[in-house]
């Protein structure tokens, strides 16, 4: 049994195999990393709608900030212009000995003199201001008796002839040509002496007297075509009032469509971005709006009325007659008096193309990760799992075969022990075996210890060293053991012990009695050899 147990303990345990364990851990780690990479990729993939909304919101905030600063600057410059021109009108009235502003009508010399003192500061203001032109419209006419004189008004209107630079040449669009030439301002190709109020948007409305401070009286007109040209413009205007509240006329700045495009292109990642400043309304009238694009690339200028429809997530769809856009549109107060509708938008075709590209990227990434996981699992099955399971099966079969061999060896050993016990029993028939078994309980404690040592296979010298007794003492106890058990030699003792172990006779021996007193002179006993 000990041999069988020892061999069984020495058989290596292969379930689970170390190779399979480490391979499984490696596959689990690989799948975990793949899942993490997939999660990271799907999170980092551009959500087109959210990214578009965020980018357009940033673009709108930048455009709104530009517009608010620009119109604040125009308001400040416009107040200074109105005050300066009003002072010049009053000074000229005093110089001409006039007591009323109405006396300027039908006084061409006085009007020419007034324009002469106004033109230089007007040009200086134009060069300092970000605009395409500046004007002063006086509520007076050179000749009120001419046909259409009720719609004709004197004044000055100066424009920049090109890019907004400090040395750009200036052109006189309205006013005295002689005065303009005197100051190096050449007449425009569409020059006229006076303004036509029927071509001025909402002239009657703007000429209505008001007691409000100047900073509350600025106004932004809608876009309208500049008379005689193909250019569309807007006016930022203020009233021209005397100290007594008399309306002298209007003054302000021109913002042309071409100037606005050149002045306010927006830095953007969108290739076809459109930015609009339009009057507040239910929809968005692109024909009444100023527009700009990007610093790089080009943009499609929206035309006609645009129908606005919410798309969710803050996006708005702009549907026009020729194109559809996606963007953001909000009403904005440019200053205390002027509110308008600002919009930033991109063509819907660009937006749909980005959505499709993002969806395709997501699908391809998912397929790639699924292919990678499949290849990893197939490789693990072919290279690791199948060979390891085959090895485990072979080792299990070898283990069972080895167990069968050990079982046979055990049976053979039992048979050999049985034959040996039978042989010992036959040899022990020369003496009384029952007397031997009956004598075992008669052994003293010391004799029993010596008997157990012999039963364990120890020799006389080993017994003396273990029990720390002399040779004569051992001989004395040996003779007592032999006498009580009815044997004559150590060989017979060993044979009887073998018989006891083989048939179980001595499996439950009684406890020995207390050890009797040993003789004082043990050296005088007869020696008994092994």
Image (spheres, grey):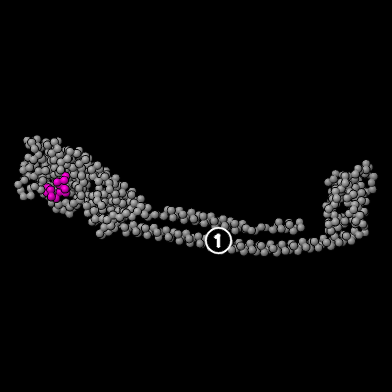
**Percent coordinates x, y for residue 508 in the rendering:** 83, 53
**Percent coordinates x, y for residue 426 in the rendering:** 89, 61
Q: How many other residues sit within 10 Å of disc 1, few (<14), some (14-19) or many (≥20)?
A: some
Name the one closer to the observer, 127 or 517. Answer: 517
Residue at 14% from the left image edge and 46% from the top image edge: 204
Quick check: 286 above or below 75?
Answer: below
Could you tell whether 3 is left or right of 334 in the image?
right
Picture quadrant of residue 307:
bottom left
Could you tell whether 522 is left or right of 48 in the image?
right
Name the one closer to the observer, 171 or 79. Answer: 79
**Residue 119 visible in rendering:** no
Magenta range is: 195-206
Residue at 87% from the left image edge and 59% from the top image edge: 424
Image quadrant in which the N terminus is located: bottom right
Q: Is residue 123 magenta?
A: no
**Percent coordinates x, y for residue 230 in the rendering:** 17, 54
Residue farthest to the front, as pictured: 282
Q: Find disc 1 in the rendering and name its residue.
A: 380
Picture quadrant of residue 77:
top left
Q: Is residue 197 magenta?
A: yes
Name the one closer to the observer, 14 or 496. Answer: 496
């Amino acid at each position: 049994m000990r041999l069988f147990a020892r061999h069984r303990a020495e058989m290596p345990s292969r379930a689970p195999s170390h190779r399979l364990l480490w391979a499984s851990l490696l596959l689990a780690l690989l799948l975990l990393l793949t899942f993490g990479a997939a999660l990271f990729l799907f999170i980092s993939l551009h959500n087109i709608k959210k990214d578009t909304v965020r980018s357009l919101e940033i673009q709108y905030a930048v455009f709104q900030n530009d517009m608010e600063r620009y119109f604040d600057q125009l308001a400040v410059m416009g107040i200074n212009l109105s005050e300066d021109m009003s002072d010049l009108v009053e000074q000229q009235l005093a110089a001409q000995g006039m007591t009323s502003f109405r006396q300027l009508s039908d006084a061409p010399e006085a009007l020419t003199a007034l324009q002469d003192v106004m033109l230089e500061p007007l040009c200086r203001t134009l060069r300092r201001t970000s605009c395409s032109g500046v004007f002063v419209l006086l509520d007076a006419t050179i000749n009120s008796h001419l046909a259409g004189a009720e719609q004709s008004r004197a004044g000055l209107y100066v424009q920049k002839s090109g890019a907004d630079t400090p040395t750009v040449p200036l052109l006189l669009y309205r006013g005295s040509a002689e005065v303009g030439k005197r100051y190096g301002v050449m007449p425009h190709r569409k020059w006229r002496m006076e303004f036509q109020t029927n071509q001025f948007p909402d002239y009657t409305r703007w000429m209505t007297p008001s007691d409000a401070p100047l900073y509350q009286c600025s106004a932004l007109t809608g876009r309208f075509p500049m008379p005689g040209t193909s250019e569309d413009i807007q006016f930022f205007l203020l009233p021209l009032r005397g100290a007594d509240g008399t309306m002298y006329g209007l003054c302000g700045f021109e913002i042309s469509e071409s100037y606005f495009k050149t002045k306010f292109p927006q830095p953007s990642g969108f290739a076809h971005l459109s930015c609009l400043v339009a009057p507040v309304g239910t929809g968005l009238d692109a024909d009444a709006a100023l527009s700009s694009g990007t610093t790089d690339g080009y943009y499609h200028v929206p035309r006609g009325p645009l129908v606005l429809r919410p798309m969710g997530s803050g996006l708005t769809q702009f549907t026009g007659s020729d194109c559809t856009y996606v963007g953001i549109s909000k009403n904005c107060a440019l200053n205390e008096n002027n509110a308008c509708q600002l919009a930033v938008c991109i063509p819907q075709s660009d937006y749909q193309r980005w959505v499709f590209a993002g969806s395709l990227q997501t699908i391809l990434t998912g397929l790639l990760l699924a292919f990678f996981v499949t290849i990893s699992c197939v490789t693990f099955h072919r290279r690791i799992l199948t060979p390891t399971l085959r090895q485990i099966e072979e080792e299990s079969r070898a283990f069972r075969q080895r167990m069968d061999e050990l079982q046979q060896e055990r049976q053979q050993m039992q048979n050999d022990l049985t034959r040996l016990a039978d042989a010992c029993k036959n040899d022990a028939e020369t003496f009384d075996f029952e007397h031997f078994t009956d004598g075992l309980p008669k052994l003293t404690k010391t004799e029993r210890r010596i008997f157990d040592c012999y039963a364990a296979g120890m020799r006389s010298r080993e017994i003396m060293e273990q029990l720390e007794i002399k040779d004569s003492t051992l001989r004395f106890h040996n003779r007592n053991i032999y006498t009580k058990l009815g044997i004559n030699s150590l060989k017979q003792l060993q044979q009887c012990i073998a018989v006891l172990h083989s048939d179980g006779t001595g499996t439950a021996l009684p406890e020995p009695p207390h050890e009797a007193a040993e003789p004082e002179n043990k050296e005088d006993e007869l020696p008994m050899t092994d």
